[in-house]
Image (spheres, rainbow, N blue to C red):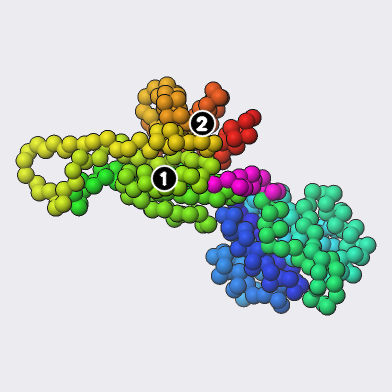
């Protein structure tokens, strides 16, 4: 999600840097807008460095360069691209402008131009906060649907004590998440996720593997983390960066994945087996590179451990989710796996469909639950599907 963060001019402006970090931890892209007064307290360079985004400081672009069509309509482009406008700190002066529709700089013009939700976090002297004009402006904004994060009480920069101190970055980020519908309903849960392929070595050069990119499992891990879970991600080799703040265990073979999963199983309340584990491996791994020779060559394979079946046998109160990637008889094969492996939920997908299956940004799946509920999901991004899977897990755990 993309957030525009407006910063107005008061001493609390320096705290906005921490707020950016909090929003980034929720995987939000942040573009900062600094008013001229805010630049007296903190520089654009600070925010450019931590966001990697252009910091907007002027209505018509860089004052050192001539205005053009792009700079003239930039506020419209930003207004249409953001998921939310957050203003923190919001001074008494800025609140008055917003309440009365005054658009005399980029931030106030953006406020009038956007249809996205608006969240303001005021900060000011206690007497200013309690002034009837400020309170009237806040009531007017709230009546129009603006979300207000009220300031904290405490010792203020002016030396006085009372309400007026900018709310914490954590509190503001939590309000933004709530407004955008980002849930924290997995707090207290430990979610063990497997992802990616496994690699079964033939010799030091060659191996058996599959086309799994790991995207689905990584999306599940990220979604669970955002919703408040402690996440353990066991991953085969991929080119993906692990989500922040997860316990990450890198493995290569099915045997290594088996050890890692069973070693973490007791800590997990939810297990989501999104990895594409190899079903077979070479019976013997050659110590040296095999040389080209005979016209025909036979490779003897043996079954690997069925990790999801082992987890199903050992489960207590855990909720176990499996995946069924099929090319035929999708629902029949998935239901059989659901029952035989003692799963609570299985995610079935036909990998022959366009835009579905391995190494794709999207997927088309059907969720089959132990209580016979069947939910078909249209082609969607894998992060969206991950959240739908978690919704169903929560339903099962709550007995709904």
- Up the image or down, 192 lies above or below 158; here it is above
Label 1 SS: helix
Q: Residues within 10 Å of mark 2 (few under 14, many from 20)?
A: many
Q: Is residue 218 magenta?
A: no
Q: Where residue 39 appears, x then y in whole percent?
A: 69, 74
Q: Quadrant of the C terminus?
A: top right
Observer-nearest of 177 and 195: 195
For residue 323, say whether it is visible: no
Range of residues picked out in magenta: 178-190
Q: Quadrant of residue 155?
A: bottom right
Observer-nearest of 187 and 380: 187
- Identified at 41% across, 53% down, the residue is 249
Q: Which residue is denoted by mark 1 in the rendering? A: 261
- Identified at 88% across, 62% down, the residue is 134
Q: Where residue 77 appears, x then y in whole percent?
A: 63, 55
- Up the image or down, 202 lies above or below 171; here it is above
Q: How many marks?
A: 2
For the residues labelled 1 and 2, the Cα–Cα distance comes to 18 Å
Observer-nearest of 396 and 134: 396
Magenta portion: prevailing SS class: loop
Q: Quadrant of residue 38?
A: bottom right
Q: Quadrant of residue 93?
A: bottom right
Q: Which residue is denoted by mark 2 in the rendering? A: 344
């Amino acid at each position: 999600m993309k957030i525009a963060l407006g910063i107005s001019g008061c001493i609390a402006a320096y705290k906005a840097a921490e707020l950016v970090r909090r929003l980034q931890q929720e995987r939000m892209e942040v573009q900062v807008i600094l008013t001229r007064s805010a630049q007296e307290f903190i520089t654009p360079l600070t925010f450019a460095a931590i966001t990697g985004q252009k910091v907007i400081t002027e209505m018509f672009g860089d004052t050192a360069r001539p205005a053009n069509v792009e700079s003239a309509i930039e506020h419209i482009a930003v207004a249409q691209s953001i998921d939310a406008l957050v203003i923190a700190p919001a001074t008494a002066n800025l609140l008055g402008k917003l309440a009365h529709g005054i658009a005399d700089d980029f931030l106030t013009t953006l406020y009038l131009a956007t249809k996205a939700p608006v969240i303001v976090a005021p900060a000011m002297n206690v007497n200013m906060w309690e002034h009837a004009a400020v309170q009237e402006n806040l009531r007017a904004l709230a009546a129009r649907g603006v979300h207000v994060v009220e300031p904290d009480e405490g010792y203020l920069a002016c030396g006085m004590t009372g309400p007026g101190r900018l709310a914490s970055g954590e509190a503001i980020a939590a309000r933004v998440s709530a407004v955008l519908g980002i849930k924290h309903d997995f707090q207290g849960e430990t979610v063990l996720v497997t992802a990616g392929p496994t690699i079964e070595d033939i010799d030091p050069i060659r191996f058996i593997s599959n086309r799994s990119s790991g995207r689905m499992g990584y999306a599940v891990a990220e979604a669970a983390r955002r919703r408040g879970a402690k996440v353990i991600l066991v991953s085969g080799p991929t080119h993906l960066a692990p989500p922040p703040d997860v316990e990450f265990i890198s493995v290569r073979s099915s045997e290594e994945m088996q050890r890692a999963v069973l070693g973490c199983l007791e800590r997990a309340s939810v297990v989501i087996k999104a990895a594409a584990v190899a079903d077979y491996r070479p019976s013997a791994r050659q110590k040296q590179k095999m040389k080209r020779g005979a016209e025909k060559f036979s490779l003897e394979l043996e079954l690997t451990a069925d990790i999801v079946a082992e987890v199903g046998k050992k489960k207590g109160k855990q909720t176990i989710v499996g995946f069924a990637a099929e090319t035929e008889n999708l629902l029949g094969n998935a239901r059989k796996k659901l029952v035989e492996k003692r799963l609570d939920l299985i995610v079935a997908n036909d990998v022959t469909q366009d835009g579905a299956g391995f190494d794709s940004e999207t997927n088309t799946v059907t969720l089959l639950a132990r209580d016979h509920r069947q939910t078909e999901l249209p082609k969607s991004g894998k992060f969206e599907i991950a959240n739908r899977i978690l919704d169903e897990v929560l339903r099962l755990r709550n007995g709904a």
